[in-house]
Amino acid sequence: MVYIKGYECTICNSQYEVNEKLHTCPKCGEKGILEIIYDYQKIKSKMTKSYFANCTDNSMWRYHYTMSVEPGLRSKYLRVGGTPLYKAKHLCDIMGFKKIYIKDEGVNPTASLKDRASAVAVADAVALKAAIISCSSTGNAASSLAGNAARIGMNTVIFVPERTPEGKLSQLLIFGAKVIVVKGSYRDAFEMSQKAIKKWGWYNRNAAINPHLVEGKKTVALEIAEQMDWKVPDWVAVSVGDGCTIAGVYKGFHDLLQLGIIDRIPKLLGVQSDGCSPFVNAYVKKQKIEPTEENTIADSISVGIPRNPVKAIRAVEKSGGSWIAVSDHNILKAMKTLGSNEGIFTEPAGAASLEGAEEALKLGIIKPDETICIIATGNGLKDTKNALEIAGKPIYIEPDMNELIKIIGK
């Protein structure tokens, strides 16, 4: 059962009834992103610590009381969520933190956090009897949509910019998506998808437009809190593109606070590449977000015009957090550091959160005695080209044991 009170526009604060099938505010247009408002009083009697102790569903749907879409028969879908939270064994000594936790989202079905949003989108599209579901993406949202839709036999049309890594393109094509590669930026791909969705009436999975998708992404925060026995960390570091993921992380902790399950919301650290950092630029200059170049290897967060800026900015502000930008070079180094010291292979966007946390520690934003959780948003196999830039070279030898002995000796 869904416990929604209604929808509220993030710009004009207009409120709408639950039975109105809206994605954006009719008064504010596409910029009027909607916030889903829950009836926490009703949820309190259902979603308790004892409920979690007895719940046998290890997917993200264990949190369905605070989700806006009811999936029905869950076995129809891929199993999304229930990803591991690791306490770092070596990073603390290397970086100077007291405690670091890593939430490994790369083990989701299509290997990224975006599965959480796509699973919600597919369930909603099924309920609405949609024939085709579509989105634009820098890669992960697209592949997650294609995979989750393929599971139930739904057709997808995906728009991606031409710089999309081959690993993500191969996923899309294997999952049977109709892939449209737009010769331009993510901005161009997004605008093309919006025009196509409007023209043909496809279901819109674009996370910045569809308010239900943040409700899927927020389950990563619910899992972090539960896996830490409801004693949340001081900080959670999140890489940021459109702003939807960090908005979802805040919403998840906010839900738990309203339900009285946790006693505070962690501070959120929004991390961007300095080659594409509209949020950080606006934060530093204390001005509105302006378009920036999309010049970063971290394709998952290479978004020059964020489509969900209001929720993202509010998330960081309300949590008492901060924003930071890091270089692509250091993002690559963080990929190697995380992999070689903790055995977690994450894509550049996932490594950005670790690099951002280390830089924030150096700048005094994060204190050495504070606990931090890093969200590794996707698996590194999605972008092997960049991984090989920092991984080092293998050793080539002839099939000669004497040669091997010499090399091992060195």
Image (spheres, rainbow, N blue to C red):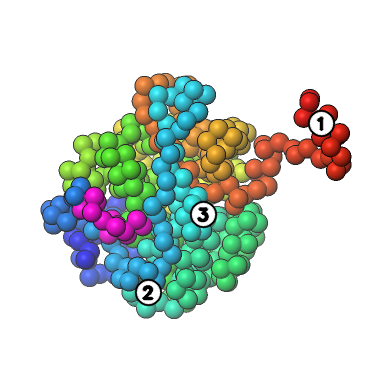
Quickly name the residue at label 2: 126
Find residue 224 and name its label. Answer: none
Do residues under tags 1 and 3 come within 8 Å of each other at their CB atoms?
no
In this picture, which residue range is highlighted in magenta?
51-64
Residue 126: x and y in percent read: 37, 74
Q: Which mark's residue is nearer the viewer, 2 or 1?
A: 1
Marks 1 and 3 sit apart, C-alpha to C-alpha, by 39 Å
The one nearer the camera, 316 or 267, is 267
Dot 1: element: helix
The one nearer the camera, 274 or 350, is 350
Residue 287 visible in the picture: no
Residue 155: x and y in percent read: 50, 75
Dot 2: element: helix
Quickly name the residue at label 1: 405
Label located before the other in sequence (1 or 3):
3
The one nearer the camera, 284 or 86, is 86
Q: Three-letter amino acid code at disc 2?
A: Val
Q: Three-letter amino acid code at disc 3?
A: Ala
Vertical position of residue 21 compared to residue 45: above or below: below
Label located before the other in sequence (2 or 1):
2
Label located before the other in sequence (2 or 3):
3
Q: Three-letter amino acid code at disc 1?
A: Ile
Vertical position of residue 129 compared to residue 260: above or below: below
Farthest residue in the front direction? 401
Give the residue displayed 49% in from the left and 34% down from the top: 354
Q: Can you say which quadrant of the picture contains the C terminus?
A: top right
Quickly name the residue at label 3: 111
Q: Which mark's residue is nearer the viewer, 1 or 3?
A: 1
Residue 17: x and y in percent read: 20, 65
Looking at the rendered structure, the number of numbered marks drawn on it comes to 3
- Residue 20 is one of the magenta-drawn residues: no
